Amino acid sequence: MKVTDSLILALNPLTTALLASIFVGEKFTRNLGVVNREYLGMLILSKS
């Protein structure tokens, strides 16, 4: 086994985890933004 092979094997789980966390984080923040927008909209509607 070459050094580069073991390096790629070692980096692969890290890269996968990183990409997954970015993807999940993006979805989470987008959902949070939608919830906040709806909440703000309800606040504005209830005040008027």
Image (cartoon, rainbow, N blue to C red):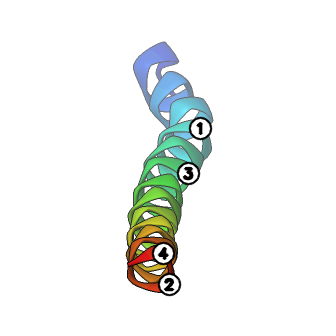
Residue type, label 1: Leu
Residue 33 spot, x, y in % from top left: 42, 62
Q: Which residue is mark 3?
A: 21
Q: Which residue is mark 4?
A: 47
Real-space CA distance between mark 2 and mark 1, rounded to the nearest whole angstrom: 47 Å
Q: Which residue is mark 1?
A: 14
- Residue located at (50% from left, 75% from top): 35
Residue type, label 4: Lys
Helix, strand or loop status at disc 1: helix
Q: Earlier in the sequence, mark 3 or mark 2?
A: 3
Q: Which residue is mark 2?
A: 46
Pointer 2 with pointer 4, Cβ within 8 A:
yes
Helix, strand or loop status at disc 3: helix
Helix, strand or loop status at disc 4: helix
Q: Earlier in the sequence, mark 1 or mark 3?
A: 1
In front: label 2 or label 1:
2
